[in-house]
């Protein structure tokens, strides 16, 4: 995987060989982005089981569950992590029921992980095509955090419509919020878009309202880490403020996320567990202490944007305008049908 | 003066001995905060004239004007800079009209600079007393940037009500936005409030909306660099976004600023010149590059909050609820009366 904490200064590959290394990579944000975390977790299961072909069948099944449990502790908010692990557990249960032996159980998990990876690529592409229809030539867009190729196995979520629009020959410009504390926008989104020859202007998070007021933003596109059944959107801290500013300026606010990001078990966003990050990411996030010793901090990694601020939710089964419980459950049902 | 760019790691005094050094100190933000910039400019005039007692009278008058012109170039937005320089020019013209000789002209400028300094101290105290009436025991407040003692010659503008409330025995808590790009909130506000034993929690700018949503903020207090005749408020970049978020959560948004911050020559905020800062403050603001080489940036130092988002403007002549052109011109008239 790309070691994303070093971007853009260094573009290095990180070799992840064990389950604890994968948990650490997810916690450190060496791999990040909800869909990418899901794919990483699925491959993390393979790391944990691939050398265990010699185990007795009952022991193997217990071990595989323990590996899934360990990976589930890496980060609490992105539901794609649990979604991918559940797909792996379901596959294991299905193969177990058919009487598969240990090598066949391992083979099934390999198939499932690769299916998750491939479907993420196809899903990103599809969301990009749907989202690109909302973008016209000459528009200027704004995004927060990084929901691009480095956040998925494919071309990204929020950035996918931009990549497809650019492929279609539309000339676009993107404002990238730097996204404190960990600067995913400055480090990753700006880098990704420059690599793709898309015009990008980096701003601090505090400038988003100002550029909207100046009439420089035609639409906002963001990703999501978990979406409740009613359409409340959990995403990187700062997204909610961007949504409020977009609403105040009548700018459409689009969320781009695969169905695997939706958690229908939670009726609304207040139930989504929000990870709190360590103080040092605020007080010395740049390799140098920039706040007084001993200062109190509060550092939620995510916030929740109420569904009423979401102009549209772009999923692989289509655009849900003003998403609500009904349209979301309907989209999930269509996704199930498509998968079967 | 305190060399504010080194806070909080180092608390050092900066010796400013010449006019170019003062211009540089203002441009670098070694001294910052609209009222402090005004006081610094007045003392900058003294640095430029104090050794010129040997000049012929006409040459001295021309030189003093040139010194004022040079200081006026330091930063374009904070009107207190021009206000203080105009007070110095007016004093010079008044003393010139009475036939004062060069030593007496210099003496007059010394008097005027010290009067500006003393009135800033008294003004801060008065605004603190008026603002403290709006704060009740146990409240949690939010501020952006630094409008404290280090931004004035006195106890600050936005922070003055907090200092007075604490003096009155009210237990308060303050969320300090870190205030990218130059982190005045993290480096200076957090440090100042900790020195004063006021509970402060440091957050990134992107977290303000979230803490408001969580019901943790009772009121917002900010300063200002220039206020138009209609009550539009220019302040540190990010203030406008905070104001939009406060409105969305029905949280009162107070601006604390002396009458010298009001520029009645500008009918509304769109006419206020906004300084743009160099890209490096975004891309390598912490001594380490955190964005790709060659990335475009946009870095307005200030934004404009429309008067309709301002719950109240606290000046030394009182609280203006929902300020507008009429109440602002009335306050300026009362200020003139008080001064005469």
Image (tube, coloured by chain):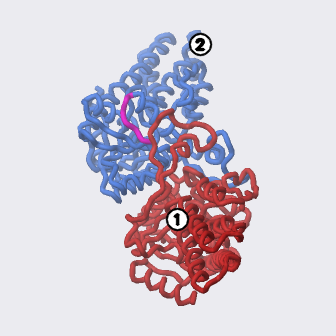
Chain colours: A blue, B red
Left or right of B29? Residue B238 is left
**Tag 2: Cα neighbours inside 10 Å, few (<14), some, or many (≥20)?**
some
Residue B194 belongs to magenta span: no
Q: Is residue B339 above or below residue B6?
A: below
Residue, disc 2: A55
| Screen quadrant of the N terminus of chain B | bottom right
From the top left corner, tell me how far across and down residue A117 is, in percent. Answer: 41, 23
Residue A200 belongs to magenta span: yes
Residue at (33%, 25%) from the top-left corner? A122
Is label 2 or label 1 in front? 1
Residue, disc 1: B78
Q: Is residue B108 above or below residue A182?
A: below
Left or right of A72? Residue B247 is left
Left or right of A170? Residue A114 is right
The magenta stretch is A196-201
| Screen quadrant of the C terminus of chain B | bottom right
Q: In which quarter of the image is residue A47?
A: top right
The residue closer to the viewer here, B258 or B14, is: B14
Q: In this view, does A37 lie above or below B107?
A: above
Residue at (50%, 22%) from the top-left corner? A43
Q: Do labels 2 and 1 share a chain?
A: no
């Amino acid at each position: 995987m790309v070691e994303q904490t070093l971007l853009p200064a260094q573009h290095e590959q990180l070799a992840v060989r064990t389950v604890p290394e994968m948990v650490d990579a997810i916690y450190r944000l060496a791999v990040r982005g909800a869909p990418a975390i899901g794919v990483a977790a699925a491959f993390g299961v393979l790391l944990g089981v691939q050398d265990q072909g010699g185990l007795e069948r009952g022991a193997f099944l217990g071990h595989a569950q323990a590996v899934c449990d360990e990976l589930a502790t890496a980060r609490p908010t992105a539901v794609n992590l649990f979604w991918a692990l559940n797909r792996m557990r379901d596959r294991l249960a299905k193969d177990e029921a058919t009487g598969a032996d240990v090598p066949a159980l391992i083979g099934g998990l390999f198939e499932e992980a690769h299916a998750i990876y491939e479907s993420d690529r196809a899903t990103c592409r599809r969301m990009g095509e749907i989202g690109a229809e909302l973008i016209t030539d000459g528009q200027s867009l704004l995004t927060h955090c990084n929901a691009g190729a480095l956040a998925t196995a494919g071309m990204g979520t929020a950035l996918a419509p931009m990549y497809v629009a650019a492929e279609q020959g539309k000339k676009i410009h993107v404002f990238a919020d730097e996204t404190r504390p960990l600067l995913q926008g400055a480090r990753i989104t700006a880098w990704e878009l420059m690599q793709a020859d898309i015009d990008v202007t980096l701003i601090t998070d505090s400038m988003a309202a100002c550029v909207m007021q100046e009439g420089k933003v035609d639409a906002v596109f963001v990703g999501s880490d978990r979406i409740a059944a009613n359409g409340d959107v959990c995403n990187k801290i700062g997204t909610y403020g961007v949504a409020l500013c977009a609403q105040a300026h009548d700018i459409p606010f689009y969320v781009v996320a695969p169905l695997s990001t939706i958690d229908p078990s939670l009726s609304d966003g207040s139930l989504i567990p929000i990870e709190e990050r360590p103080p040092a990411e605020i007080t010395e996030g740049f390799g140098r202490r920039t706040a007084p010793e001993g200062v109190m901090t509060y550092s939620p990694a995510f916030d929740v944007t109420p569904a009423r601020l979401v102009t549209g939710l772009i999923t692989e089964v289509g655009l849900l305008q003003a998403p609500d419980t009904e349209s979301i459950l309907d989209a999930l049902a269509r996704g199930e049908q498509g998968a079967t």
